[in-house]
Image (tube, helix red, strand yellow):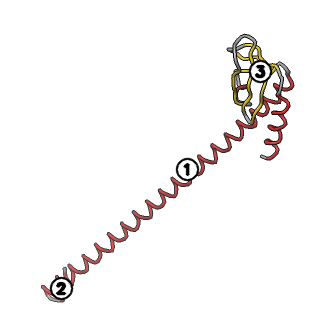
Amino acid sequence: MHEINEVKSKDFDSLMDKNVTHRKYGNGNIVEVNDKIIKVKFDKIEGVKKFIYPDSFNGYMTFENKELQVETMRLLETEEAKKRVEEELKRQEYEKKEEEKRNESNDKLKKQKKATKAKADRDQEKALKLLKEELGEEQAVQV
């Protein structure tokens, strides 16, 4: 991860004064680089437009310099792969929590069933004891 940050910092320094082409705004030149924000002055419009680097190069903008474009596409692929890994880890964590909830629920149900069965057994023993007392030992055994 440290290497990716170093690559980004290095890329930021190398982006100044690079020519780009935007799908909507046409040709322009990078006039400022600050963290993940690049500012571009386009030939045909007033002012400067801000873009997130490298995200804005994912189909909207390209570098005139093909090597820089290839490096940027690799950086985009690396970031996309990192996002997919993070999403997979989140999904796995969610599934783990859901499994824990299901296990807790199943354990609770098992305890309730066990308690219900124990109560039914106790109730049955009480009923048998009462029956024995009322009918006497011999008749209760026959029942």
Name the N-terminal-most of marks 1 and 3: 3
Q: Residues within 10 Å of mark 1 (few under 14, many from 20)?
A: few
Q: Residues within 10 Å of mark 3 (few under 14, many from 20)?
A: many
Which residue is tagged 3?
Answer: 62
Secondary structure at numbered mark 3: strand
Name the side, left or right, on which 8 lies relative to 109: right
Name the side, left or right, on which 59 lies relative to 106: right
What residue type is disc 3 on?
Answer: Thr
* Residue for point 85% across, 22% down: 66
Which residue is tagged 1?
Answer: 94
Q: CA distance from mark 2 to mark 3?
A: 94 Å
Name the N-terminal-most of marks 2 and 3: 3
Which residue is tagged 2?
Answer: 132
Nearer to the camera, 105 or 2: 2
Q: Residue furthest top?
A: 44
Question: Which circle marks residue 121 in the picture?
Answer: none
* Residue for point 16% across, 87% down: 133
- In this view, 103 is above or below 8: below
Nearer the observer: mark 2 or 3; the answer is: 3
Secondary structure at numbered mark 2: helix
Q: x%, y% of residue 2?
A: 80, 47
What residue type is disc 2 on?
Answer: Lys
How many marks can you see? 3
